[in-house]
Image (cartoon, rainbow, N blue to C red):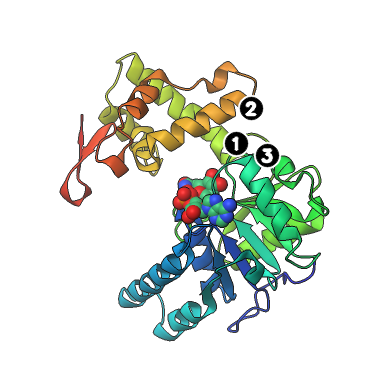
Amino acid sequence: AAGVPAEKPADKASALVVGVIGAGTMGAGIAQIAAAAGHTVRVHDARDGAAAEAVAKLGKTFGALVAKGKMPADAAADAVARLMPAASLAELADCGLVVEAIVERLDVKNALFRELEAIVAPDAILATNTSSISVTAIARGLAHPERVAGLHFFNPVPLMKLVEVVSGLATAPDVADRLHALAGAWGKTAVRARSTPGFIVNRIARPFYAEALLLLQEQRATPDAIDAALRSAGFRMGPCELMDLIGHDVNFAVTSSVFEAFHADRRFVPSIVQRELVDGGMLGRKTGQGFYRYGEGGVMQAV
Ligand code: NAI
């Protein structure tokens, strides 16, 4: 696939036009870093006005970065000028790379990729930010499944360094190589994986959460104690505060998906304690209550 340069040309706009589909949490973050890295970025969302709203919000984000001294004003202005909402998918025709960050549903992603194939050039790379769906399944049925790969960012995209570059069964090695190089040029640390449930991080993190949830279920330690222990052991955050940050609904759904994908392997059994929080709408920070209560200014109190 031509069009993705191995390295970003220094101090000038890249020739690679990047399309981002889905202007939600992840899509907005991906659009931000791609524009900051010098690409023209076209943002599309199925919901009318969502792409324009996201682009307007990113204008404010870049303004805030300048105000905090984290970015020169001219670089921010250039990045903002490179970000454009696309009212229709057809406007993504000149994109050499499209990153999909829409709803986590295989049928919807399949339909989108099929539609996209008819719009972009035959050598454009189609990347998916999916965190739990098989990249092989997303590429299924396409005329060119070899140009589909996972480009899995972590939330919040501008802050989290890691990107998993995921190859499905049909992915061309060259496509994964180019995405790996591109993620590096965007300031990320890219690692490679084959498509497999949970890829690397979402799989290895399961027992980290699961053992904390079992300790809580057995009433052997409080969230405070568990978090303090893991933090002083060198983790940036303890498992309870981290689940509160991610959202119990999201965390439970990922565990359930990995559990199901591994044919109900006991190692990945979803937690009944977490299920209770989800059922009670105590989803963590976003609802003000999870294992901790979040008051004014985000101060937390163990429940
Ligand atoms: P979100 O709900 O914030 O945003 C999704 C956006 O996609 C919405 O604006 C929606 O209107 C739009 N959309 C839905 N269907 C569409 C379609 N057919 N065409 C165009 N736009 C469509 O979701 P979020 O959290 O940004 O997640 C997006 C993807 O990224 C999912 O695949 C998710 O699994 C993955 N992901 C999410 C992470 C997270 O922490 N939120 C982390 C890593 C991956």
295 sits left or right of 218 in the view: left
Mark 1: which amino acid? Answer: Gly
Q: Quadrant of the C terminus?
A: top left
2 sits left or right of 28 in the view: right
- The residue depicted at 63 percent of the width and 27 percent of the height is 261
- Decide which of tag 1 and tag 3 comes sooner along the chain: 3
**Mark pair 1, 3: CA separation:** 9 Å
Residue farthest to the top, as pictured: 218
Mark 3: which amino acid? Answer: Ser
- In the displayed structure, would residue 116 be above or below residue 290? below
* Callouts 3 and 2 close, C-beta under 8 Å: no
Residue 160 in sight here: no
104 sits left or right of 49 in the view: right
- Return the mark for residue 116: none
Quarter where residue 185 is shown:
bottom right
Query: In the image, residue 90 lies at what x, y percent?
Result: 66, 68
- In the displayed structure, would residue 172 be above or below residue 228? below
In the picture of the structure, the residue carrying the numbered disc 1 is 198
